[in-house]
Image: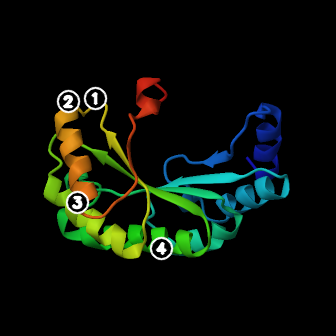
Amino acid sequence: MTHEEVLRYVKRLTTPDIHSISLTGGEPLLAGNFLVDVARACRRAGFATYLETSGESSEAMEKVICYLDFAAIDVKLPEHRAVPRRSWRRLFEKELACVKFALERGVETFVKIVVLPSTQPKTITHVCKHLTRVARIPLVIQPVTPARKVHSAPSMTHVYRLAQAAARAGVKHIAIIPQMHKLMKVL
C-alpha cells in the first residue's frame, strides 16, 4: 500500500470519538520512510498520531518524531530474550535514547514493560532507576497473557511487587494494564 491508500482507509474508518491513529505493527520504526509518509499524511489530515514501538532505532525515531503526538516505548527485559543476554544493555540504551528523544521533542510518552512470572524486582528497579534519570515518565506494567509459547502469567501479588519496586526506584505514575490484544484474541 502507499501512504495515500493508508490515509484513505483511515478516513473511512474514522469515528467522531477517535483519539489518534495508532502506528504499530511488528516494529513500525523498521518501516523507514513509509512510516514517516503515513505519519505525515495523518498529521496533514488533522489526525493525532500514536507510535507504539520497541524503541530499537533512535535514527528512525528522529525521522518521524515531528509527526508524532504520543509514543509508547516498549522496554524489553533480559528475561524476554528479545536479544542475546550480552546484547541486552545495547538494546536498553537504544530504548532509553528513544524515550529521551521523544520527551525532548514534546511527544507525550510512556514506557511499557511486559512482565513474566520470572521477572525479578531487581530487574525492574534497575530499569526504572535508568528511566527516572531520563525523566519522570509514566510506566505501564503489562502482565504477560498466556498464549502460544507462554504458559503462565505472573500472579497479581508478583505484579504488585514489581510495581512497588518501580515506585521505590522513583517512578511516580504506574499503571497495571492487561495485554488487551491477547485478551481480545487479536494476536
CA–CA distance in space, label 1 to label 4: 32 Å
Answer with left or right where residue 57 lies relative to residue 64.
left
Q: Is residue 58 above or below residue 181?
A: below
Does 75 appear above or below 180? Answer: below
Circle 1 — which element? loop
User: Disc 2 and disc 1: Cα gap in Å?
Assistant: 5 Å
Label located before the other in sequence (1 or 4)? 4
Of labels 2 and 4, earlier in sequence is 4
Question: Given this view, does label 2 or label 4 mark the residue nearer the observer?
Answer: 4
Comparing labels 3 and 4, the label whose residue is closer to the camera: 3
Amino acid type, residue under disc 1 in the picture: Pro
**Which percent across, then down, holds residue 124?**
23, 57
Task: Report how far apart the C-alphas of labels 3 and 4 lie in the structure.
Answer: 21 Å
Q: Which residue is mark 4?
A: 100
How many neighbours does mark 1 have within 10 angstroms: few (below 14), some (14-19), or many (20 or more)? some
- Decide: few, some or many residues near mark 3? Use Cα within 10 Å; few <14, some 14-19, many ≥20: few
Q: Is residue 27 left or right of residue 146?
A: right
User: For residue 146, which numbered disc appears in the image?
Assistant: 1
Report which residue position mark 2 lands on.
152
Q: Secondary structure at mark 3?
A: helix
Q: Amino acid at mark 4?
A: Lys
Select label 3 or label 2 by which is in front. 3
Question: Are the residues flagged by discs 2 and 1 in contact, CB closer than 8 Å?
Answer: yes
- Tag 1 and tag 4, C-beta contact below 8 Å: no
Q: Quadrant of the C terminus?
A: top left
